[in-house]
Amino acid sequence: MDKMKEIVEKLNLWAYKYYTLDEPIVSDAEYDKLYDELLKLEKETGVILPNSPTQRVGGEVLEKFEKHTHLRELYSLQKAQSFEELEDFHNRCLKLLNEYNSINNTKKILEYYVEYKFDGLTINLTYDKGILVSASTRGNGVYGEEVFEQVKTIKSIPLEIDYKGLVEIQGEAIMPLSALVKYNETAEVPLKNARNAAAGAIRNLDPKKTASRNLDAFIYNVGFK
């Protein structure tokens, strides 16, 4: 068991360096050799650790998606389709800030931080005692669909983190444009765009099909801790 834990930790570190930081520290051949050793140990012992990288490849086809209850409600950003809607949002922010300044006798000013938005599918990750135990879609914000097996195929998502409490983390499951182009080169039915490709991959009952699209993830929020 100790040997298996050591191999899993090493493989997960190598994967983190490669997929998340884009800083590979070993060759593909070296990774594959240790990965095969882990597979052999799992087969011999019948033991598979919850953070084992062998669980990323995708298991059996699921019959249906199970309902998942979020620990804390997930909110969705509203869209502004016109200048008038954007101006209305700005005025609401000003009103709230003026009320705050009046109550607290402060002179804070309104500032905006603008960033690009990844267009994919919102995912909610639950870690308990450092281990990824659940992954779901946003759904209606209170209830989502359990997509744990699908999300485990995303190699940039860690199966284990340092935080040992219970925590929910939100992010966006995305299909990089480079992955979309590569997939379409051999696909019988080409995918139309990266957003639908990511959403369709996560909401596919066959985790192996999810894995075939080589998704990535961008984590942006801690929702419950």
Image (spheres, rainbow, N blue to C red):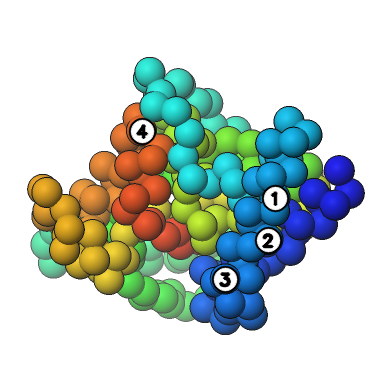
Residue 23, by quadrant, is: bottom right
Mark 3 or mark 4: which comes first in sequence?
3
Q: Nearer the viewer, mark 3 or mark 4?
A: 3
Taking the image as shown, residue 187 lies to the left or right of residue 12, namely: left
Who's the residue at 41% across and 24% down the image?
Answer: 62
Residue at the spot of label 4: 206
Secondary structure of the residue carrying tag 4 is loop
Taking the image as shown, residue 115 lies to the left or right of residue 8, namely: left
Q: Pointers 1 and 3 in contact (CB under 8 A)?
A: no
Who's the residue at 31% across and 59% down the image?
Answer: 175
Query: Of the numbered discs in the image, which one, if any, rests on residue 13?
Result: none
Q: Pointers 2 and 1 in contact (CB under 8 A)?
A: yes
Nearest the eye: 40 or 2: 40
Q: Nearer the viewer, mark 4 or mark 1?
A: 1
Residue at the spot of label 3: 29
In the current view of this chain or complex, which residue is farthest to the top?
Answer: 63
Residue at the spot of label 1: 38
Q: Pointers 3 and 2 in contact (CB under 8 A)?
A: no
Assign the N terminus to one quadrant of the image: top right
Q: Amino acid at mark 2?
A: Leu
Disc 1 to disc 3, C-alpha distance: 14 Å
Disc 4 to disc 1, C-alpha distance: 24 Å
Who's the residue at 68% across and 61% down the image?
Answer: 34
Query: Of the numbered discs in the image, which one, if any, rests on residue 34?
Result: 2
Q: Amino acid at mark 1?
A: Leu
Q: Residues within 10 Å of mark 1 (few under 14, many from 20)?
A: many
